[in-house]
Image (cartoon, rainbow, N blue to C red):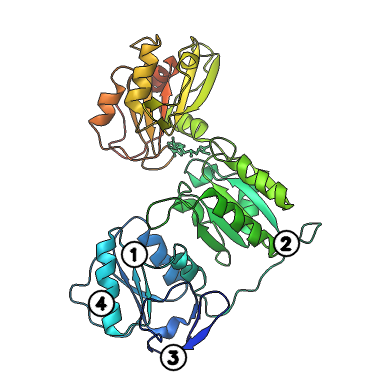
Amino acid sequence: MSITAAVGPGSSQRIGGGARTNDGDIVTGITIGLKPSAGLCLVVGAGPQLQARVEGLQVRGMSCRVVPDLDGQTGGDVALLLALDDDPRVNAVALEWGRQQGIALRYGEGCPAESTLDLLRTLDAEPRPVRKAQGASGRGEVYLIGAGPGDPELLTRRALRLLQAADVVLYDRLVAPAILALIPEHCERINVGKQRDRHPVPQDEINVRLRDLAQQGLRVARLKGGDPFIFGRGGEELDRLLDWGIPFQVVPGITAASGCAAYAGIPLTHRDHAQSCIFVTGHRRAGGVDVDFPALVRPGQTVVCYMGLHTLPALCAGMLAHGMDPLMPAALVEQGTTDRQQVIVGTVSDLPDRVAAREVHAPTLLIVGSVVTLRSRLEWFQGRPDGQGF
Ligand SMILES: C[S@@+](CC[C@H](N)C(=O)[O-])C[C@H]1O[C@@H](n2cnc3c(N)ncnc32)[C@H](O)[C@@H]1O
């Protein structure tokens, strides 16, 4: 067994099989080459991101044992301990156990934000050859790619081609696992959507990572849910790249409004119902939501609201207060275009209560307008068996 670890930038050390680190503490800031024969990887925890990480290890030839907690575990030949539970207390107990067992490589709470991902993308035994970008400039390049709302078949051909040509992919929380599965094995993946502490990687940090990777001569795919220019901060990222002289390309994606409306059977601008369609966000702000309500209640218009689940009652109340017909049809599309899609249909008056009565999972999209009535005829996509709405 051979484990090579570089601890902190610039320094590296070789750790023999099963040996402790010098200080016996959690190994942090680590880049690892770990041969598949190294021994077992014990993964402690449960949580939505766990499965993908375990698969990442298994793809690299590691044998993994996943346990929700440490009951009944012994040290055995555990070479690597990953404490990845959503609950920091579970992780703390696991890491302390690992320390007592003398497991040299331990990951979890207390490690730097990116360390677990650094680990997963560098588990290959051999260093990955760095491919140089083929752009006319000879420098790296950033591909800003829209991944669509969830169904991987909604990815465009250009998106897929560039994704498969990339050396590294930085992806957001909303990019569906089925789309991540299309990224070639040789390609590094970096999740910039959510860290262990549930906060997204700050935008400035993402910008700097894009720059640094491109300046290494890499083709960098920046993969975003939906369309990068619709509530996706794509323009901000390109602005910074432009400042730094980094070349880029943009690939549009199917935005949630188009995808969810199509899969819910709601034509957003059916000409018998709506002559315009307005996209807004339902962001919370002190004392309510940051929405131009008079603009939402115009006749002959469909309203599509992104990021409006938590502010749904305030959004509906605001539209009613500004004169919207209380019987105006409204729908909430949950996890649209995926096999978990559900659609809750009501009116702008009763939709908040209907939604409150259900267990609803983000992401969700609110559609308000008489076009919603068309769903009763045009509904075609079957999500979950219980996902038929009302
Ligand atoms: C930060 S915005 C990003 C929008 C994205 N750029 C786009 O064009 O769809 C995230 C919001 O998009 C909506 N959304 C994205 N994917 C969705 C899906 N599959 N089903 C329902 N809503 C979705 C939700 O309102 C979510 O809160």
**In the rendered structure, which disc, 1 or 2, sits on the residue that comes first in sequence?**
1
Q: Which image quarter holds the C terminus?
A: top left
Mark found first going from the N terminus, 4 or 3: 3
Residue identified by numbered label 4? 97
Q: Give the percent coordinates (x, y) of residue 93.
A: 24, 70
What residue type is disc 3 on? Gly
Question: Where does the image place residue 74, in percent across and percent down from the top left?
Answer: 23, 82
State which mark lies toward you, 1 or 4.
4
Mark 2 or mark 4, whichever is nearer to me:
4
Label 3 packing within 10 angstroms: few (<14), some (14-19), many (20+)? few
The numbered dot on residue 133 is 2
* Among the two numbered marks 1 and 4 on one chain, the one whose residue lies closer to the N terminus: 1
Residue wearing tag 1: 84
How far is mark 4 from mark 3, CA to CA?
Answer: 21 Å
- Disc ID at residue 16: 3
Give the mark nearest the N terminus, 3 or 1: 3
Say what secondary structure mark 2 lies in: loop
